[in-house]
Amino acid sequence: MNRFISSFAAASLCLTVPGLAFAAETMLGKLKIAAPYVRAMVPGAEVGGGYVTITNTGGADDRLIAASSSRAVKVEIHEMKMDNDVMVMRKLEKGLPLPAGKRVQLKPGSYHLMFMDVIDPFKQGETIRAKLTFEKAGSIDVDFPVGSAVASKADNGGDHANAAE
C-alpha cells in the first residue's frame, strides 16, 4: 500500500472536510466564504489582489471591515469601477457591505482585497493565509490558493454590474 498521498489527492481530501478555513467553502456564522484565490505576482510587483465570494445567508446585514496577512504589510478592501470611461480604484474606508440574503463577489475589476507591500511575492501553487474580519460575524483565517498571474475567463474581470447579487 502506498503511504504517500499526492498533493492533488490531499487537496481533494481537504475540500471535503467541513468547517476548515482552507476548504473551498466554509461558514462563519451566517456568512458562507467560498472560492478564495490570489494571482501569482509578476517580478517587481509590490501588490497582489485577493478574490473570494461571500454569501450572507442570514437575515441581518454584515460588513467585511478588515483583512490582514503575514505576507503583506497591510491588506485593504478595494473597489474598482468605471467613472466616465476611466477605471478608478479606491479603498472602502467603511468596509464592504454584505446585505442579508445576498452574495457579494470580490473579483478582478470589482471589489477585491489588495495585499500591499507584499513581503514575499506570491508564487503559483502556494497558499496565502489571510484573516478576514467582519463587523458582526467576527474573524476567520482563510487560505487563498495562488493561481496563474494571467487572467482567465473565469475571473470575469471588469463585470462590476454583477458584483452583488
Image (spheres, grey):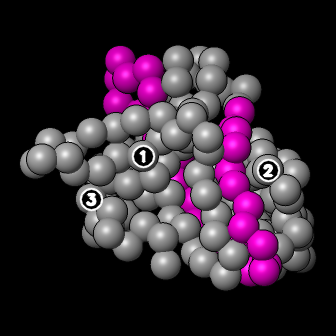
Which residue is the extreme one toward the left? 85
Residue 104 is drawn in which quadrant? bottom right
**Residue 34 x, y percent position in the rendering:** 65, 69
Q: Residue at x 29, y 50 (%)?
A: 81
Q: Earlier in the sequence, mark 2 or mark 3?
A: 2
Distance, label 3 to label 1, CA atoms, is: 11 Å
User: Given this view, does label 3 or label 1 mark the residue nearer the observer?
Assistant: 1
53 falls in the magenta region: yes
Which residue is labeled 3 in the image? 158
**Three-letter amino acid code at disc 1?**
Glu
The structure residue drawn at horizontal position 49% and vertical position 78%, both measured from the top left corner, is 165
Q: Residue at 85% across / 65% down in the picture?
A: 28
Q: In the picture, which quadrant includes the N terminus?
A: bottom right
Tell me if label 2 and label 3 are in contact, CB under 8 Å: no
Cα distance between the residues tagged 2 and 1: 18 Å
**Residue 140 shows up from this direction:** no
Q: Which residue is mark 2?
A: 135
Q: What range is drawn magenta here?
A: 41-68
Q: Is residue 57 above or below residue 156?
A: below
SS for tag 1?
strand
Q: Position of residue 130 (x, y in %)?
A: 71, 41
- Give percent across and percent down for residue 85: 10, 48
Q: Which residue is mark 1?
A: 79
Hey, what amino acid is under mark 2?
Glu
Q: Residue at x 74, y 46 (%)?
A: 132
From the image, state whether disc 2 or disc 3 is nearer to you: 2
Q: Are marks 3 and 1 in contact (CB under 8 Å)?
A: no
From the viewer's perspective, is 76 left or right of 67?
left
> Visible in this render: residue 62?
yes
Q: Is residue 114 above or below residue 64?
A: above
Q: Is residue 89 magenta?
A: no
